Amino acid sequence: MRKRALLLAAALALAMATMVAPAAFAADIESAATTKADVSTEDVVVSADSDDLTAIAGGCDFAVGDFERASKGSNRNIADAYYGYAYYIGNKSDTLMYLVTSDSVIVYVDPKAADAAGFDLASDDDLAQIQQLIVKLDAQAGGGGALIGNSATWYFTSEQENELNGVLYKFNQIIDGSAYNLVVGKDGSDVTDTSNPHYVQTSFACFASLIPASEAVIAAEPSWFESLGAFMSVLDWSPLFVTLRTTFTAIVFIFILGLAAAYFCRQRSPKVRNIFDTIFTIPMVLPPTVCGFLLLLALGSNTPVGQWFIDIGFPLIFSWPATVIAAVVVAFPLMYRGALGAFDNLDPNMLDAARTLGWSEGKIFFKIMLPLSWSSIAASTVLAFARALGEFGATLFLAGNYLGITRTIPIAIYFEWMNGNTDIAIFWTIILIIFSFLVIMFINLWSQHTTRYRKGAVEE
């Protein structure tokens, strides 16, 4: 009995000590932890102005404005020192910030801004209202990315540095003249390393301003026509011009090289033909990123070829010509295979008859082979054009992402989505879908026209 009493007393003492002086958050904050399942956003109104994303709820004394989201942070050193996994803030004066992990949301509220906005961290009503605003804004700015999980535990704090389960969550930390939000082990270790016993799966971070509701500006939802006009007025059209310029230039090389390679292979013995056929077809089998990596190894500035082009003042890597090279390499097999198949279907007796009449190989090619194979060659050309139009992996590896120079539409879609500009990414996606539709429609109409022509010739 005495031992049981001692154990019970020790357990009570430990529990009281934990409640009185918790390691991470103040007792009132920790006890206010809740889950998203309790959050309803029906009464929240969000501004239609994407440049100043603001939300307010009915009956709420405060609002959240100037909302921004960072989907990715950095785990590199800052000013030659490691501070943890960092989300860059810059020189902005944000007063509401939160870090999201796989199972928690840690919200920091600047105490001065909270007083000015009439927000009370100790009020359950205020905590519920701030959750409503955050969840609504987070869904608005998510852009198809990860959102706060339904089972996530929420923590609220007015302290810039907080500890939770051996992990420090630091807000608005000034390093080398810039502000960051940091996630780091209590011992300074990298908690994003899966081997760390305090491993944390970071998701994203958000920054905003906590303001009085009277200062919130909620822009009205514009009409569809007004939204379209505003969108088009600020859209950068350079990816379209770069893409068309690259594709039309590339298709010239693809057409010539594809026909030449097909004609060359047709003239070779079966063993030699198999070797070259494999080489010419490999880019169609390899992932585009692998093709881009191999091109980078072959044409990089440290290679003899790349250095020679630099010496003559015509660098290839990370320039517009690199986009053409990438498109040619990736789309070439489609042209080559189509042309080779068309040449193989020609009647060899007809070609031999032309030779007996004294026709040269060049005359046979241009007068017989090319006209009779033209329908298949044209279809292959259009398919190669479409493939070059949508090239992404090899282009990004070899040419990079330079606005107005090497940023094609596929690259623009990826980086606009990564930056949260979902509307722009969707627009360019629609443009590519339209181009693809036109290409397929052209091929179908061409095939139908060719079929009718051949049927008519046979009937005659």
Image (cartoon, helix red, strand yellow):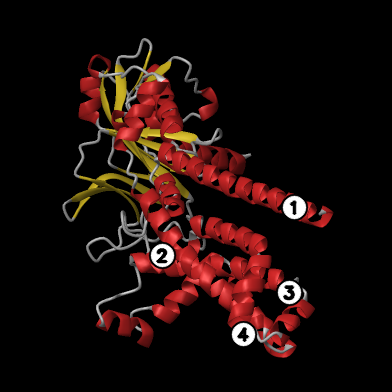
Disc 2, SS = helix
Which label's residue is closer to the chain start, 2 or 4? 2
Residue 248 placement, left or right of 376: left
Residue at mark 2:
323
Front-most of residues 114 and 165: 114
Question: Which mark's residue is nearer the viewer, 3 or 4?
Answer: 4
Residue type (three-letter) at the residue carrying disc 2: Thr
Q: Is residue 375 left or right of residue 32?
A: right
Label 1–label 2 contact, CB within 8 A: no
Q: Secondary structure at mark 1?
A: helix
Q: Front-most of 366 and 433?
A: 366
Mark 3–mark 4 Cα distance, whole angstroms, equals: 19 Å
Q: Residues within 10 Å of mark 4 (few under 14, many from 20)?
A: few
Residue at (67% x, 62% y) in the render? 376
Place of residue 422 in the rendered image (x, y in percent of width and height, measured from the top left): 43, 39
Give the residue pinned by disc 4. 360
Q: Tell me which amino acid carries mark 3.
A: Asp
Q: Residues within 10 Å of mark 3 (few under 14, many from 20)?
A: some
Amino acid type of the residue tagged 4 in the rendering: Ser
Q: CA distance from mark 1 to mark 2?
A: 36 Å
